Image (tube, helix red, strand yellow):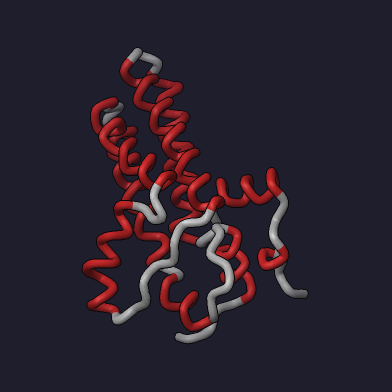
Amino acid sequence: MNTISDVTRARIEAQGFVGLDDRTLAAINYWLRLAPAICMVWTAIGTALTSPIIVSALIPFAALGAILPGHPFDLLYTHGFRHLAGGPRLPRYAAPRRFACLMGTAMLIGTALAFATGWILVGRILGWGLVGAALVTVTTGFCIPSFVYGMLTGRPRAYVMKS
């Protein structure tokens, strides 16, 4: 498929991936969800087990997603799946996607600390909240933290959907 809907384009652009043609966006649309999917599953396991160790082990990966031009889990696509799928490289992360990783990092820290200090309910609320937010991204391509970033900073014109 070489075309995408205006809604899909808007969701991807809201994450800071702007200026890409339809063919590229169609090729990377689902691959941009790989890192959030891995984080979602990892967080779900740590939350279900109320394990501060499992949740804490994900924190560096989430933090690197906020700091680096891409998420460490994107390397699975870049050095593996991309060659099998014949797809393009993933674009560099812009501020909205990095903000999403930063928010994930904060929620992971809160979850791990809550579990470690016996505040199990708080840990579960934070952990399952993060899983829920990631599930939205993985299933629809809509990134809640990127949307919040856009609301706080003002959305660039490229993010406005065509009528």
Tell whether 20 sits left or right of 85: right
- Looking at the image, which residue sits at the far bottom? 2
Tell whether 99 sits left or right of 105: right
Q: In this picture, is 46 found above or below 110?
A: below
Tell whether 48 sits left or right of 107: left
Q: Nearer the viewer, residue 148 or 67?
A: 67
Q: Kindly indicate the quadrant of the structure image that contains residue 117.
A: top left
The x and y percentages for residue 3 are 53, 84
Residue, x 25% and y 70% (percent of image)?
81
Q: Kindly indicate the quadrant of the structure image that contains residue 80.
A: bottom left
Q: In this picture, is 133 found above or below 74?
A: above
Residue, x 29% and y 30% (percent of image)?
56
Q: Nearer the viewer, residue 67 or 24?
A: 67
Tell whether 24 sits left or right of 151: left
Q: In this picture, is 91 found above or below 148?
A: below
Residue, x 35% and y 47% (percent of image)?
39
The x and y percentages for residue 153 are 69, 47
Residue, x 48% and y 37% (percent of image)?
129
The x and y percentages for residue 145 are 56, 46
Q: Nearer the viewer, residue 111 or 105?
A: 105
